[in-house]
Image (cartoon, helix red, strand yellow):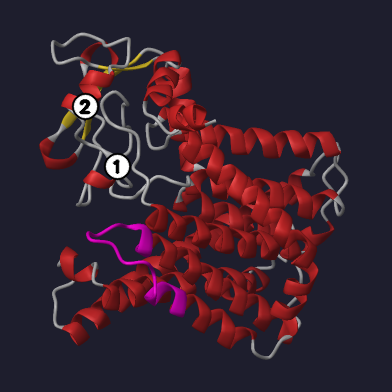
Amino acid sequence: MSRLLGTLCGSQPVARFQRSCGLFPVSEEGGCSSEPSAEGARDRGACNGAGALRSLSVTDRGFPNGVRSGRGPKGCTQKYVVKNYFYYYLFKFSAALGEEIFYITFLPFTYWNIDHSVSRRMIIVWSIVMYIGQVSKDILKWPRPLSPPVVKLEMRTVAEYGMPSTHAMAATAISFSFFIATTNQYKYPFELGLAAAFVFSTLVCLSRLYTGMHTVLDVIGGALISAVLLMLLYPAWDTIDHLLLTSPFCPLISITVPLVLCYNYPKLDYYSPTRGDTTTILGAGAGATVGFWLNNQFAAAAYAGDGFQLRLPLLSSRVVVVMLARFFVGILFVLLTRRLMKSLVLAVLGYHYKFPVTDLEARRRPEVEVPYKFITYSSVGFSATVVVPLLHQLLGLI
């Protein structure tokens, strides 16, 4: 068992998976390296996991013969060859399903167009699962795969630790909570929903191997932790939902508990984006939760989409137009809110703590980063659940 675990947490299985999908590093001699080298990993193991102590960026520039380049820490440049573009774009897209762009579009879309109760359950599960996953990374402090032999296609999260994969956790939590919450309410084949949830989570999990960001054990651990948390939370769903909607203490608890968790986040010896990402998630969840409570207190009108039945034929053209209109109006307002609050909160914090808004190091300080992220994204969550529905009602989209 110890040998198996040692293999699963190593870099070699990740490198072999990348090679089998047509992703190869370019060797120092300029050729394509087909076999992962353990010696190369030890001798040239830069661009690796917890060893990256500053923010990084990836650039994909055009190179002949499908060669691309990813820039790592301290000037490390790793070129790679893509021989199978189907897998390349499939897993790049799948990786995006675990990023902010997906959360900020899919979760509000569910609230505006499908079902309020389904959206509430997903947001609560997502917030809890992601907080546990992010904190676990900085407690366990397991490094990410070595590069080389692994090709790293992303560099933003290189400064984070690896175990567990929060992409795997979020994908498992969102897909299966959506499936569980809708299977008894809407008319669609059980097997279809289960298969969709499995495919979604599997693609995101495999994308973390393809992009070189996690070991096999990171991904398996993330998915299993999320599954266990989902099973533990499921029996209490209705109780939690009822308390969130009716308890007079809900707004106070929804704001203070996440703030306390963010300010008491585990400290590291160097800056890692995990605290900021955690604050973003908890802030969005807090704002949305306050919005849920407020809507219930004032009996906000439900969307016509609450009666939506997923069956063939799926939707009429008119319903599709209304759903798209709701989405584009809503997402535009949410993005404008995020942009406005980012600028406003950062300006106020810069004035209070006497630093220019362009000072990246100052923005990473806990007393700046936590309120900056929390206020911004709690405003996003609140606007998505309260202000946007009012806007939809004003425009006749409800």
Relative to 139, residue 342 above or below = below
- Viewer-closest of 154 and 216: 216
> In this figure, which residue is indicated by the disc labeled 2?
42
Magenta stretch? 260-276
Identified by mark 2, the residue type is Arg
Residue identifier under label 1: 49
Looking at the figure, which quarter contains the C terminus? bottom right
Secondary structure of the residue carrying tag 1 is helix
On the image, which quarter does residue 198 sit in?
Answer: top right
List x then y, in percent, for residue 109. 62, 56
Residue that lies at the very extreme toward the front in this rendered image: 2
**Between discs 1 and 2, the one toward the N terminus:** 2
- 113 in the magenta segment: no
Q: Residue at the location (32% across, 26% down)? A: 150
Label for residue 198?
none
User: Eyeballing the image, is 257 above or below 135?
Assistant: below
* Residue drawn at 79 percent across, 34 percent down: 192
Q: Is residue 33 visible?
A: yes
Q: Nearer the viewer, residue 297 or 36?
A: 36
Q: Specify few, some or many for label 1: CA neighbours under 10 Å numbering under 14, 14-19, or 20 or more.
A: many
**For residue 93, above or below residue 271:** above
* Picture residue at 55% right of the left edge, 55% below the top: 328
Which of pointers 1 and 2 indicates the residue nearer the eye?
A: 2
State the image coordinates of residue 193 (x, y, percent, origin top left).
Answer: 77, 39
Q: Is residue 322 visible?
A: no
The residue shown at (53%, 54%) is 103
Question: Do labels 1 and 2 touch, CB within 8 Å?
Answer: no
Tell me the amino acid under the disc marked 1. Answer: Gly
